[in-house]
Image: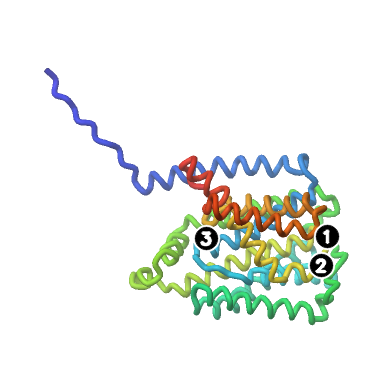
Amino acid sequence: MAAETETIPFEETELDVRARSYAHHGIVFAALAVLLLAAPFLVYPVFAMKVLCFALFASAFNLLLGYGGLLSFGHAAFFGMASYVSAYAAKSWGLTPELSILLGTAVAVLLGTLIGAISIRRQGIYFAMVTLAFAQMVYFFALQARFTGGEDGIQAVPRGWLFGVIHLGDDRTLYYIVALVFFVGLLIIHRVIHSPFGQIMKAIRENEPRAISLGYEANRYKLIVFMLSAGLSGLAGAVKAIVFQLASLTDVHWTMSGEVVLMTLIGGMGTVFGPMVGAAVVVTMQNYLAAFGAWVTIIQGVIFVACVLLFREGIVGLLARLLRRPL
């Protein structure tokens, strides 16, 4: 009689899990690319561009909060200041759109470096309050500075010609440029999250004293992720100024910082695609419920409370748990 062979259970290694996660994310990215290509034929291009700008903003904020564990109440400073610089460079200096956007992003990175170097010295609620204080300083600077236009902002910003070749006056043409910027930005965030740097950031988020004991300079890593988040937030704000041909105090107001927190939590903090979904939900509500006036804020509050009570992981976080797949 043949000897019975013992079945040895298969155990997935970390590499197997990571490869499966990459393959799954690749499918989601491919589906997202198809959706981005079809979007301007399904919805108004300007509305789609607004969603993408805020989706990039929320994804950049999630990089800091969801993976760095740092809650900032001042991200409107980077979003809004980049918007002002981009708008001013395009209108007053006559720079091309790509140079205006790059200049606005560079200013956001510089501002993020200055604010981050001071803010990361504190943790928890103290970190959040320091970032809020800096954001309020940026707000009052934007209110008083001459180049920002005060309460009127910078209006009639020219869209111009991209690289001197592509005219951005057509909404659909501009949409595909914005979609490309968003898609590349999301790929950068995905790569950062799944890089050795991202793994160290997760370790610092989970147990900073242990990470320090292993030899990692926690403050250096936190400053770098703060700068990355500020730069990508600035990129979103700079693009938004070109899209809407406007930079205003709304972009640097503290409520903008609150909105990006709301988008991230509704979509799913600590997920790659959650902030994008959260941004789409919030912007859609603001757009299609505008007839309710001030009630829109109350409706947003009700939805936020419902999300926190029913599924704390957010919309995408809940889907990831149900599908047992990382999103």
Residue where numbered disc 3 is placed = 66
- Of residues 70 and 245, which is closer to you in this image? 70
Around disc 1, counting alpha carbons within 10 Å, would you say few (fewer than 14), some (14 to 19), or many (20 or more)? many
Around disc 3, counting alpha carbons within 10 Å, would you say few (fewer than 14), some (14 to 19), or many (20 or more)? many
Q: Horizontal placement of 198 versus 145: left or right?
A: left
Around disc 2, counting alpha carbons within 10 Å, would you say few (fewer than 14), some (14 to 19), or many (20 or more)? many
| Separation (CA) of disc 3 from disc 1 | 34 Å
| Separation (CA) of disc 2 from disc 3 | 34 Å
Q: Horizontal placement of 99 versus 158: left or right?
A: left
The image shows residue 230 at horizontal and vertical percentages of 62, 68
| Separation (CA) of disc 2 from disc 1 | 8 Å
Q: What amino acid type is highlighted by mark number 1?
A: Arg
Do the CB atoms of the residues marked 2 and 1 lie less than 8 Å apart? yes
Nearest to viewer (mark 2 / mark 3): 3
Q: Horizontal placement of 288 versus 34: left or right?
A: right
Q: What amino acid type is highlighted by mark number 2?
A: Ala
**Element under label 3?**
loop
